[in-house]
Amino acid sequence: MNTSNYIAVIADDLTGANDTALQFFLKGAKTQVAFGEDISIDESLQTEVFAMSTESRNSDAKTACEKVLNASENILKKYNFEHIYKKIDSVIRGNIAIEIMTLLNSLELDAAVIFPAFPSEGRTTIGGFQLLKGIPLQRTEVSRDPAFPITESNILNILKSQLDEDKANIVDLIPLDIIMKGAGPILMKLNDLISKGVKLVVADAVSTTDLEQIALAINKSGYKILPSGSAGAAQALSNIWHPSVNEDNEDITLPRLPKLVVSGSATDLTASQIKRLQENDSIENTYFIPIKPENIFSNDIEEISERILNNLVKENTVVIHSSELIENNEELSALLLEKELSKEIFISGICNYLANVTQRVLSQTKAILITVGGETSYKCLQAIESKNIQIKDTVAPAIPLGIDHKGQYIVTKSGNLGTQNTLIEIIKYFEQDK
């Protein structure tokens, strides 16, 4: 990789890196995704898009800055990327302002355009407020996120809260009335804001067309701009950065293997997806193993692993999940009070436990690994020593199929992504003949 015809994606969690890389894959680009403490590019792979996860979403501000700066200095500045995209969470979790400002300074860029709307997934931005299916974030379940609760829906206020007080004037908005007029007026407003010293430009958007017009304006600006947003915004940029669609994507021959679904996600959506899968009569031979508090506290990895291995045969599906544990909120809160543990630490403990179980199981048998939740996905893949995943297909909207360097088939899904039927769609994908 020593020429400039390459695109880099830098995300703060693994599922974000994957679902964003998928947008470029769908335009025919060959992609790889890397993550972990020592991110590196596998130069033996034919790659046009390189996505990386710094795993900094739940880090403190100082650590997040260090992780992003390390990636910038050792990857982004080392290779001659033509385009760089900063993926952020569409429900505005993470050290967004800190990470973007770190990149602007390191890469000597003029400003960032932040457009986190993802209309096809119900995320829109109006007046700088981020809405989830029309409801302000602080009134949705993301306000109860154990690791990063969102108590503010105004993106500008969120960004300003992560900056020093004297930096408040570097944040501004391109409102919806300008966005709706198209790329020309957007470009005029964008250039005007940057000329006045604005570094973080938030852009409203309520439709895919809005995202496309913002992308066009970014591309036409004479300033050096860092686009930053959702997988939806990446999809809009892919039309410009990689416009030629490869009609001859290689056919995928899916392996006839059992499926291991590992979910440590704490979202209501994930719980409903698991419940809908459990109630579905069209998918046979599916076994569910709900994690209980005693499993975590006693760390009984061997017993749970044996239960999984006994059922993980032929083309069966085994689902190990924490949804029932998290659903019993009052009971769990009382237990954590007794154990003197925070919910955040306990959720992280669940992910560690699931990662250890996954490692033990996959060291003894082959299976397709399907992980749900950003931290769960990262820790599970770290436990089985996966590296540099290549995106090979789309399993469901914004959900990719990847293969790692050992030939392990991997699907990662964000806990906040999809509909109630998404897990059903994922399982049915592997039941089709391709």
Image: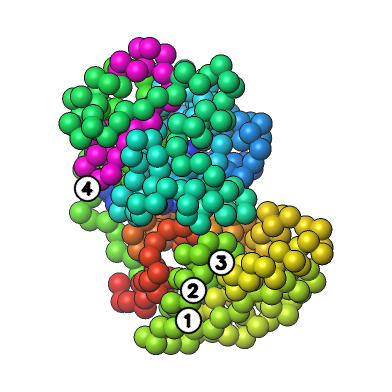
State the separation of the CA atoms marked 4 and 3.
34 Å
Which badge, 3 or 1, comes first in the chain's sequence?
Answer: 3
Please name the residue that numbered disc 4 is placed on: 245
Report the quarter where the C terminus lies. Answer: bottom left
State the separation of the CA atoms marked 2 and 3.
9 Å
| Amino acid tagged 1 | Gln
Q: Marks 1 and 3: in contact by CB < 8 Å?
A: no
* Horizontal relation, residue 6 to residue 212: left or right: right
Compared with residue 430, is residue 416 higher up or lower down, i.e. above or below? above
Q: Marks 2 and 1: in contact by CB < 8 Å?
A: yes
Q: Which mark is residue 263?
A: 3
Please name the residue that numbered disc 2 is placed on: 274
Which badge, 2 or 4, comes first in the chain's sequence?
Answer: 4
Where disc 2 sits, the SS reads helix
| Amino acid tagged 3 | Ser
User: Which of the 4 image quarters holds residue 223?
Assistant: top left
Q: Give neighbour class at mark 2: few <14, some 14-19, many 20+ (Cα, 10 Å).
A: many
Compared with residue 245, is residue 95 higher up or lower down, i.e. above or below? above
Q: Marks 3 and 4: in contact by CB < 8 Å?
A: no
Magenta residues (range): 191-215
State the separation of the CA atoms marked 1 and 2.
6 Å
Q: Residue furthest front?
A: 139
268 or 50, nearer to the observer? 268
State the separation of the CA atoms marked 2 and 4.
35 Å
Q: Marks 3 and 2: in contact by CB < 8 Å?
A: yes
